[in-house]
Structures are given as structure tokens and as C-alpha cells.
Amino acid sequence: MNNTVSAPTFLENLRSLTSESHVALEALPVSESILKPDVTDVEYGHYLTIMRDVVKDAEENIFPITATVITDLDSRNKTHLIEADLTAVGAVVTDAEKPLSDGIENLTLPFALGVLYVIEGSTLGGRVILKNINGVLGHDAEKGAAYFSGYGGQTGSRWKAFLDQFTAYEAANNAGEEIIAGANYAYNAINRHFSKSTV
């Protein structure tokens, strides 16, 4: 008997079982600040600074572990985009912390994929943030909002390509529980990092 879960069911479980930690992260004042109708460059720059820590840590310490599954990671690097945006808004690029990898011992591939799911999934929300940042502050993909521009018009197709490889791995390895644990860990680790940072 096959105990593997179908891709749609697995993704439904993943979204359901990470919903609480996801919503808690989005409800933080720093998360809400960049969606305000009166967001300032200072608030925006602060958000980019702490998000850079997360993205840089993921690219340096999570991406290498998952590269055998997600085969186009080189084109998914975004630290350089955040750093360009920070320069554009006049924010100082500081030494990065490691909010994700510092709290993990014996990082496994499925757990790392759960973390990566959160990082890649943020590109979808980035499109909503981009609309506000562009409308209020005037930043765009060319200057000041390269990170939130993500993959531009390819954002949807790049997310689907990620999910195809991601769910294929889960189906072949019956690793849903550990992937979900990794995703919840990522949401909570980012929450802790954001919570200790103030403008």
C-alpha cells in the first residue's frame, strides 16, 4: 500500500499546519509597517535590513543543502537585490545575523526544504508589498524595490516550478512531517528576529 500523500493534499496540509505561525509573522508591527499607506523610507529601510539577514542566511546555509532537489537556486539569489535597495534608500548595510541557521543543529534536507518553502513563498507576498512601496515611496524594480519585484512577470511560474520539484521530493520520500516542521521553524525564527528589531 502506498502511504505517500498526493501533492495537492500535502500542500493543503502544509498551508494548514503552518497557518498559525505564518499569520503571527504577518501580524508583527514591522511586517505591517511596509503595507501602511504612510510608510516611510526609514521603516522600509529597516525592514529590508532585517530581511537581508534572513535571505543572506538562507542563501549561504539553506540553499546548498537543498540544491540537489531545487535545481535552479543560483537564479533565486536575492541578497544582492536587497543590498542594492538598501543603498538606494540610503540605509547602511550592517553585518548580517543568522536568524535561521544559528538555531538549527543537524539540518536535514527535508527540514531545509521546509525553510526554503517559506523563503521562496515570500516572493508572492512581495508583489503586494511592491505595489504599496511603489505607490507611496515611488521605488520600483529599477531602483529601490528590486527585491520585492522578485521575478517580475515570472513570479507565478517560478513559484510553480519550485512547487513541482518540492512536492516531487516529498512524494518520493514521504517527508511531509519534517518539511512542515522546517516551515514552522522558519516562520517562528523570522518572527523572533523581527520582534527584537526596532526602527
Image: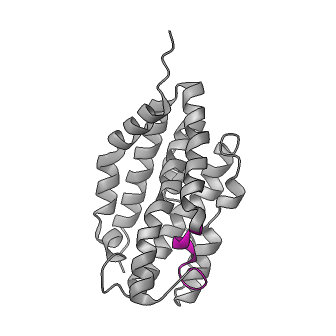
Task: Decide which of 137, 84 is in the foreground and name it.
Answer: 137
- What residue occupies the far top of the structure in this picture? 1
Asked if one can make out residue 76 in the rendered structure from this viewpoint, the answer is yes
Residue 20 in the image, given as x and y percentages of width and height: 29, 48
The residue at the point 64 percent across, 51 percent down is: 63
Asked if one can make out residue 108 in the rendered structure from this viewpoint, the answer is no
The residue at the point 49 percent across, 37 percent down is: 179
* Residue 161 among magenta residues: no
Compared with residue 102, is residue 11 higher up or lower down, i.e. above or below?
above
Compared with residue 146, is residue 113 higher up or lower down, i.e. above or below?
above
The residue at the point 61 percent across, 67 percent down is: 78
Q: Quadrant of residue 76?
A: bottom right
Residue 68 in the image, given as x and y percentages of width and height: 70, 40
Residue 125 in the image, given as x and y percentages of width and height: 43, 63
- The quarter of the rendered structure image containing the C terminus is bottom left
Compared with residue 167, is residue 101 higher up or lower down, i.e. above or below?
below
Instruction: Identify the magenta region.
Output: 141-152
The residue at the point 46 percent across, 25 percent down is: 5
* Residue 151 among magenta residues: yes
Q: On the picture, is 199 further left or further right than 55?
A: left
Residue 177 in the image, given as x and y percentages of width and height: 44, 31
Q: Quadrant of residue 158?
A: bottom right
Q: On the picture, is 108 further left or further right than 136?
A: right
